Each structure stands twice: as structure tokens, then as C-alpha cells.
Image (tube, helix red, strand yellow):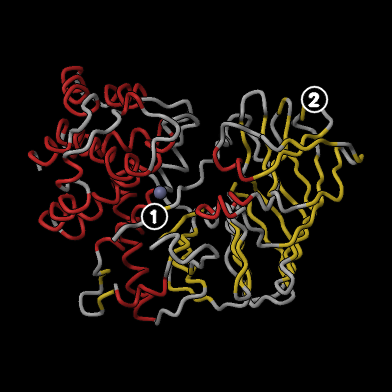
Amino acid sequence: MKIKLLVLSTSLSNLVVWGQTPKLTGNIDINLINGQITCDFTLTNLPKLDDPAISLNRGFNIKDLKFNNSSIDYNIDWGFPGRTAFLGEGIGIIPNVDTILPSSKISISYTGAFPTYNSKEEIASGDGMSVIAIKNNILRASHQTLWYPILVDRTSNFTISKYEYEINVICKDCESIYLGGTEPVNARKGNFKTTEPNDIMLYVGKYKFKKNKNTFFLNSKLDNVQTDILNSSLDSIKSFYTQILQANYSQPTVLAQIFTIGPKTQYEKWAFVVYPCIVADLNELPRQVNKVTNKISDINTFRIYSHELAHNFFGLKIKADNDYWGFYSESFAEYLSLKAIEKFYGKEEYIKFLNQRYLSVYALAKQYTPLTHIKSDIGTDHLYNYYPMLLIGLEQTIGQQRIFQLLAYLVNNTKATNLSIDTLKKSASDIGVTIEEWNSFESNYIRSSNCLTLVKSKL
Ligand SMILES: [Zn+2]
């Protein structure tokens, strides 16, 4: 089954640089009947930003923009900005100021009605993580929709999408409100607060939710036995990663039912994550959890959830702001999900899955772009299928114990975002991989235009 996994956040914020967390406070008023969203936000605790831009969804109209309490003029930049993929969905509001200082305060109020649709030519990308979707009295909007303001330093492309926040939500037709970073509530309005910086997911409307131990289930039809199985499966995956990576999860997992507003054929199956919320087709899970074994019976479904849970570390803690973003986010998350499959389904099932999904006759005959020549538009086949096999190749070269050590080292020591192959090489050397071992990995796997036959022969 072909699975389209949308990319995780590629936000580039590096929150420790200036030692204070950007803060967003204000109000959002949502009307599910006419789709109108009205926001009034203030941004404080900001780092110094030169040539600043505020990126917002194209469906919003600005009512007022204030800088240090005074209304200021602004221009719109459609082409803004070139480098960061998800901001491409937005529009740049360029305030008439040269620099934002840590003491600066920006207030912005705006309104818009959703969903908005792209032109017919672009309809293939008409639904995804960057779309503010409203359907059947539910609204879903990830941070990539730019429903709240995202700040950019246009001299460096440094981007802020994660905020600590205090937001009043009013949604008079809602039954439940979920704002990423806080727990869902059964209410039509609420004051939501967190001091932990978050990319903010919004999932509100006429739906019910339930909690089973460490997992929330939004808008799902799962019964208690099914939520028990899912909660314990997700917990086992999280404990496995925690043990390998020596790093923790800080929030309960939230699972929310996905819905599409794109063409039926757009995706056979898709999911996305805005940590700690995984938005996926929960309605198909009853067929995939086994009440006899108490496990997820479908390995591919297990893979999707373990892939998304791995993004807590690869994608969120470690992220590249260059062409390697997908390698350090998607390929590492995929590799970890395969290790979870090996752990929970056994070696035989793991090898069978690898052979079917990544090492098919078709894949073995293809020509791939070596990791040394990665490009920004490298595509999902490389990121989700081929480069994870390079990491299996690294495991075949240095052994599982040391690759786990290497992953833990990366998670706990990587602060920079300008990552490359050298980042991996240097970290490998730091944990004791010899130069001979690295050179062997590099020539046999990295520089090869197809290392899959080698990977397969060494399984
Ligand atoms: Zn992913």
C-alpha cells in the first residue's frame, strides 16, 4: 500500500540561542458556521531580528499592526521567502521597521474565512499540512498553515514558529477544543497556557475525545479495549526510543482523526504530526489492532506511528536548515521505525518487511542520488525509502550497539542546524568509530548510486 506521509515541521527555530522563549498572547475567535477565524495576538520575548517579516496564511486580511503599541505601516511580499518550504504557503507582511529588538512588542490582528482553495493547476497539492481545513464542523490547522504569525529574519532566514503562549479561544459552535501543547478540553471557550515552546496545532469543533493513560484520542470511534492497545503500543515504542536515545518525551501523545478536503485520489493514506499530536486515520485502526495479542497487527500501521513518534527527536530536537533537513528528519525517523519493528515483531518479520518495502527488485535496479549530492527537491523516495537503507548500511558497518550510541550522541549533543554528512562523521568519530570503518561505510554505501544489493546481502 502506498503511503503518503507529509513532512513534519521544517521550522527552523533554535530556541536556545538567545536564552528566552518567544511568547504569543491573545485571542482567537472561530466561527464554524461561516469558517471565519479572527485573531488578535501580541508577540514578545523575541530575539533580535533584522529585516523582519511576519508570515501569515494568504487567506487572512490584516486589520492592524502595531510595533511597541503604535500602529505602523507594512508592505506585502508574495514571493517571500525562498528558502523555507512551508513558509511558501504564506504571505510576508513586511513591517516598516528595520530591526526587532528583544524588548520589542509586536501586535497583529487579522481575520479570514476558510477553507480557501488553490487554483485547479495546484489542486494536487490542495490538501496537506499547510491547509486550514474545515469540514463537518471540525477545523484542523497545523503551524504550517500559518494560522498564527511566524517571524522571519530575512537576512539569515532564521524563523520562529514555536512559542510559549497564553491564548483565549472562543468557538461558540464547538464541543471540544485542542491547542497543541495543552490538553484538550470539552468546552466552547477556554484560556490555554503553556511555558513550553510549541509549534501550535489547532483542532477544534463538534467532536468528542477520550483519554487512555498517556494518550488522548480526538474524534475517534475507538472503544476502550482498542485505546488500551494503542496506548500501550505507543508507550512501548516511546520507552524503546527513550532507552536507545537517552532522551525523554515531555507530553502525552494526542491522536486526532484526519479528514481531507482534497480530491479523493489525492492520498491513499496519509498522516502528519505536530508534536505531540499525530493526525491520522484512526477510524481504520479497529481493523488493525488485535484484541487477542493486544498488539497492532498491521506492521505498516505500526511503522507510521513509530515513524511519527521518532520525529520528537529527529525533526524536532535535531533539524537541519539546509538540503539535509529531510535526511536528518525523515530518513532517521524511518530508520528508527524499522528498529522498532525489529524489536516488537522479531527479526524474521523485520527482514521480510525490508525486502518487500525497500529492497524490491524494482528498487535494486534503480539509480539513486548519493547522499553527497542531495538537493532540496530530492523527493520522498530517497528520503523515506533509500536513505534509511544507508543508515542500515551504517549499522551493518559499525554494529547496532554503536549506531544506537551514535543516535543518542546526536540527539543529546547536536545544537547546530547547518548539518551535513560531516556532522554524522564527526559524531561517529566522537563515539569511537574508526576512520577505516567510516571510510568503508562511505565508499560502500554513501557514494554508491545504489547500495541496496549490498544491504540486502548483509541482512
Ligand atoms: Zn515524517
Q: How far apart are marks 1 and 2 (CA)?
A: 41 Å
Height in image: 444 above or below 132? above
Determine whether label 1 and label 2 are within 8 Å by CB: no
Q: Where is residue 1 in the image (x, y as percent from the top left)?
A: 28, 61
Q: What residue type is labelled 1?
A: Lys
Residue matched to label 2: 98
10 left or right of 364 in image: right
165 vs 110, nearest the viewer: 110
Q: Residues within 10 Å of mark 2 (few under 14, many from 20)?
A: few
Q: Where is residue 388 in the image (x, y as percent from the top left)?
A: 27, 41
Q: Which residue is drawn at 65% across and 62% down?
A: 115
* Residue 262, numbered circle: none
241 vs 326, nearest the viewer: 326
* Residue 4, numbered circle: 1
Q: Where is residue 262 in the image (x, y as percent from the top left)?
A: 53, 62
Residue 458 location, quadrant: top left
- Kindly state the secondary structure of the residue where label 2 is placed: loop
